[in-house]
């Protein structure tokens, strides 16, 4: 081409959660059945939308207006309902004009970061959810800027690290939080959120909080929304129905915008997000229309509580399966749908492998792992030996080696097998590159 067509940030668009699927499919082509533990889709892992919710959706699907365009920011009645819900939490108040619907939070994240000036950076967590870190890096054309989440402190943010980076990098215009956190399962206490608000107010920046998993907390954690603590600082929270109902295929999420009236520059930025949405006309109408009916149904609180108990049991099951394994560090999750394992410093090396029965597959893995991060090499070997697909922690803009798996498997026996198999594979893999000798794991025994 006579002109370079590629956006300078194109190389930053990395989503390891889905990219690992490409490698897994190559393994599957060699006759190994894959157990998918990479993507947070409850429906694909066996959870069903309750019948009463389906009835509500079905009744709305017969209404003619469910097939029409709606207002660019979303159905007015639904936005009014959500604004009332925000105000009921206490803290900063919003109006329906502060609610903006998107086609899922992927769309929201793309718009939120895409509307920023390239020089305006957003400091986010590490480990980072790939959609946020990639979108932020792509908009700027540089590597994602991050602050440290501490695995030794229940994966809570290192506030000193946050403030130092904000103080000495004046390109930082915003702070990103994910609460409850993906991938670590951390839930931020009120005092941590208050520290983020203090930093934002001190350095005149905005706050962005992904609250996708607000209704999935357990093990004694109490969710505190950004609206409750943000005061007069400009910011926004992102929410969706994908993991609560669960209905990820609805692609329905929204932003709750706070304190537009406090800063004209922030107000113009938000207006540009709405303008970008207006070019698409609107977001999908049917999922928006059912939100008030589902959220106010007397069965909805019971549904949420049942799921909290379910994920608490699964999180604790995973913790117990891994906590006695040498060479790794695990933290008991308190929210969201994931479990993260961190390898201890120095535990991994390039000589480690899992035994494979297939010489051709073994050769394929050797070639595929020549120039990859140490934790990704483990993930590839795990796939080849067991068919289990997890995500390397290095794929979450993180320097710590490890991996993330889901807590979504609905088959109790299969979930127990997955946990036992991965824990055994970790032990054998770590032993394989030392004087302990050959790994004891056998691929045929582990595949289900």
Image (tube, helix red, strand yellow):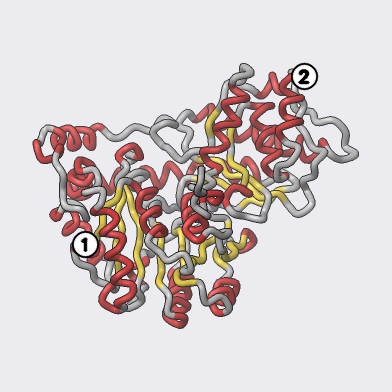
Residue 326: x percent and y percent? Answer: 75, 46
Residue 59: x percent and y percent? Answer: 13, 34
Which mark, residue 359? 2
User: Which residue is found at the position 16% from the left and 44% from the top?
Assistant: 69
In this rendering, position of residue 275 left or right of residue 398? left
Check disc 1 and report its element: helix, strand or loop: helix
Which mark, residue 266? none
In this rendering, position of residue 362 left or right of residue 83? right
Answer yes or no: is residue 182 visible.
no
Answer yes or no: is residue 75 visible.
yes
Check disc 2 and report its element: helix, strand or loop: helix
Residue 374: x percent and y percent? Answer: 72, 44
Which residue of the protein is positioned furthest toward the right in this rendering? Answer: 435
Q: Above or below — where is 6 with respect to 175? A: above
Residue at label 1? Answer: 83
Q: Above or below — where is 163 with respect to 223? A: below
Do callouts 2 and 1 mark residues in contact (Cβ within 8 Å)? no
Q: Quadrant of residue 434?
A: top right
């Amino acid at each position: 081409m006579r002109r370079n067509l590629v956006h300078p940030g194109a190389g930053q668009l990395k989503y390891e959660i889905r990219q690992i699927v490409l490698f897994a499919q190559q393994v599957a082509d060699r006759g190994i059945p894959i157990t998918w533990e990479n993507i947070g889709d409850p429906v694909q892992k066996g959870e069903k939308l309750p019948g009463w919710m389906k009835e509500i959706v079905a009744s709305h699907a017969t209404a003619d207006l469910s097939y029409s365009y709606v207002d660019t920011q979303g159905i007015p009645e639904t936005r009014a309902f959500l604004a009332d819900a925000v105000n009921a939490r206490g803290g900063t108040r919003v109006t329906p004009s502060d609610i903006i619907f998107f086609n899922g939070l992927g769309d929201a994240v793309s718009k939120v970061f895409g509307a920023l000036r390239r020089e305006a950076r957003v400091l986010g967590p590490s480990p980072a959810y790939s959609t946020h870190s990639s979108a932020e890096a792509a908009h700027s054309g540089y590597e994602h800027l991050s602050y440290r989440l501490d695995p030794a402190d229940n994966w809570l943010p290192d506030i000193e690290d946050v403030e130092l980076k904000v103080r000495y990098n004046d390109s930082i215009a915003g702070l990103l939080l994910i609460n409850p956190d993906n991938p670590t399962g951390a839930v931020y206490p009120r005092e941590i959120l208050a520290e983020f608000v203090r930093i934002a107010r001190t350095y005149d920046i905005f706050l962005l909080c992904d609250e996708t998993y607000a209704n999935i907390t357990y093990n004694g954690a109490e969710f505190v929304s950004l609206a409750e603590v943000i005061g007069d600082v400009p910011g926004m929270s992102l929410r969706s129905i994908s993991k609560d109902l669960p209905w990820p295929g609805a692609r329905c999420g929204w932003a709750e915008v706070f304190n537009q009236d406090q800063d004209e520059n922030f107000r113009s930025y938000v207006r540009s997000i709405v303008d970008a949405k207006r070019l698409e006309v609107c977001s999908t109408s049917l999922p928006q229309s059912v939100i008030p009916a589902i959220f106010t149904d007397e069965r909805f609180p019971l549904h949420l509580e049942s799921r909290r108990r379910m994920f608490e049991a699964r999180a604790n099951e995973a913790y117990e399966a891994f906590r006695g394994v040498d060479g790794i560090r695990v933290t008991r999750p308190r929210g969201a749908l994931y479990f993260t394992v961190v390898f201890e410093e120095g535990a991994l090396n390039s000589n480690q492998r899992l035994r494979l029965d297939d010489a051709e597959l073994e050769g394929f893995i050797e070639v595929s792992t020549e120039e990859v991060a140490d934790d990704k090499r483990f993930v590839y070997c795990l796939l080849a030996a067991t068919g289990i697909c997890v995500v390397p922690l290095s794929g979450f803009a993180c320097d710590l080696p490890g991996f993330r798996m889901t807590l979504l498997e609905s088959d109790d026996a299969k979930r127990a097998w997955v946990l036992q198999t991965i824990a055994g594979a970790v032990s054998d893999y770590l032993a394989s590159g030392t004087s302990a000798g050959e790994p004891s794991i056998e691929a045929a025994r582990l595949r289900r």
